[in-house]
Amino acid sequence: MSELHIIDHPLVQHKMSLMRDKNTGAKEFRELVSEVAMFICYEATRDLPLKEIELETPLAVAKTKIISGRKLAFVPILRAGLGMIDGVTALVPAAKIGHIGLFRDPETKQAVQYYSKLPEDISERDVIIIDPMLATGFSACAAIDEIKKQGAKNIKFMCILCAPEGVEAVQKAHPDVDIYAAAQDAGLNEEKYIVPGIGDAGDRIFGTK
């Protein structure tokens, strides 16, 4: 069964509080999203395998470790997922980046895909899908479906904030995909927004409202 990992580090929780504040402006909100994404990515990559090597320090030969074997790809869900890219690539600059474009149908609330561009070797990579919000889970499940169609086997989903409904949807549809988040809120309102939440992450990142 898919596991939900909540990153409850004090710095993450402090930055989450600043993001929740409706008076936090777009510039600061963008910076907070990027910073929190970096913290979550730190935990989401904790299981990367290592190998031992020898190298020369300025003083002597040292036995030390480097990441071995596994290549990463980050796939933001457009458009809000773009706000997390700088944070995760600061930690893993060699990772490849794909993009999946999804929008929420205003009537059905279902995810509609309008764009997909993934690395050619996506099937050979560990994939971390990134999106600030896991609300209904429709977009997350659609993105996971698309990436699995391309042959990827090891997939994780990383978000800033999640709701129980979204977590349940991902766990039911994709029990092999672990979820990493900074916080889980009470649930969704009638418009399928996370409450108390942080508002519309895309609008706040890009200053469009």
Image (spheres, helix red, strand yellow):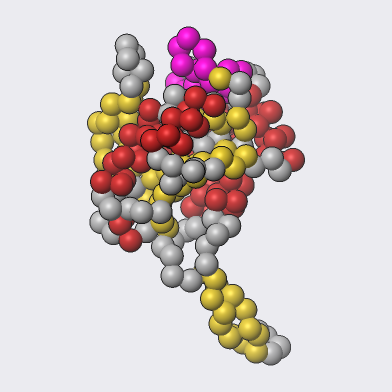
Q: What residue is shown at x 63% (from left), y 83% (from top)?
A: 63
Residue interval drawn in magenta? 188-208
On the picture, is 130 further left or further right than 145?
Answer: right
Q: What residue is shown at x 72% (from left), y 34% (from top)?
A: 14
Return the x and y of residue 192 as percentages of the image width and height.
Answer: 46, 16
> Is 43 above or below relative to 169?
below
Q: Nearer the viewer, residue 96 or 72?
A: 72
> Is 62 above or below relative to 66?
below
On the picture, is 108 further left or further right than 155?
Answer: left
Return the x and y of residue 129 as percentages of the image width and height.
Answer: 42, 43
On the picture, is 54 further left or further right than 208?
Answer: right
Q: Quadrant of residue 105?
A: top left
Of all residues, the one furthest to the bottom in this rendering is 60
Q: What residue is shown at x 71% (from left), y 88% (from top)?
A: 59
Of all residues, the one furthest to the front in this rendering is 1
Q: What residue is shown at x 49% (from left), y 21% (from top)?
A: 200
Of all residues, the one furthest to the right in this rendering is 10
> Is 108 above or below relative to 76?
above
Residue 68 lies in the magenta stretch: no
Return the x and y of residue 172 as percentages of the image width and height.
Answer: 42, 34
On the picture, is 162 further left or further right than 126?
Answer: right
Residue 205 visible, this orientation: no
Q: Quadrant of residue 7?
A: top right
Residue 204 lies in the magenta stretch: yes
Return the x and y of residue 44 as percentages of the image width and height.
Answer: 55, 50
Q: Nearer the viewer, residue 182 or 23?
A: 182
